[in-house]
Image (cartoon, helix red, strand yellow):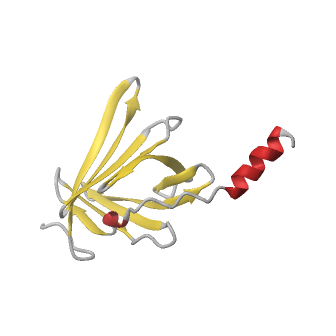
Amino acid sequence: MPTAALFAALLIQTPPASPPDLSWMAGYWLDCSGGREASETWSDPRAGLSVGHAVTVSDGEAAFEVSHIGPTPQGFAYVAQPGGAPPTAFVLVESGPGRAVFANPQNDFPTRVIYERDGNALKARIEGEIEGQARSMEWNFRTAPLNTRCPA
């Protein structure tokens, strides 16, 4: 049997890896720090797919991102579309209870997306380089009832 055919046969016989349990991300999350109002909403995983959206209001301007986490041709990934831009996939490189790290070294910024849950807190962090300098942004969310707003 040619090597390519043998490899293809092995792939067909290998059961697909089960998706990681990211149910700990589900819910409505709010961050009222730094003079901004940022919220993220994540669905519970269904057949390995979670769907999310984020809204940030700062200085009277609103920005949004639509995203999902699930199977992609690149592997299990976080797929972001900030402001309706074309999708960018960040492949899952690490996961465990309350932590998931996604990476895309070819993206300009960020190259890593990290989520960590601790009780009623969800930390989201993006990392990478801008003009050769290490940069990051972080959000410290708290669970909140759906559509809760920051105090005026």
Residue at 72% from the left image edge and 50% from the top image edge: 10
Q: Which residue is outermost to the top?
A: 132
Query: Quarter holding the C terminus?
Result: bottom left
- Please give the name of the residue rendered at 12% of the width and 67% of the height, measured from the top-left corner: 151
Which residue appears at 59% of the width and 56% of the height? 72
Q: Position of residue 71 (x, y in %)?
A: 56, 59
On the image, the x and y values in percent for residue 122 come to 24, 58
Side of 11 where 43 appears, left or right? left
139 or 44: which is nearer to us? Answer: 44
| Camera-side residue of 91 and 65 | 91
Q: In front: 96, or 28?
A: 96
Residue 5 screen position, x and y as percent:
82, 46
33 and 127: which is toward the camera: 127
Query: Residue placed at 79% from the left, 45% from the top?
Result: 6
Q: Quadrant of residue 14?
A: bottom right
Residue located farthest toward the left when viewing the structure as drawn = 151
Q: Quadrant of the N terminus?
A: top right
Q: Residue furthest bottom?
A: 146
Q: Residue furthest right?
A: 1
* Left or right of 25, for residue 111: right
Q: Position of residue 22 (x, y in %)?
A: 38, 62
Question: In the rendered view, would you say 68 is above or below 35?
Answer: below
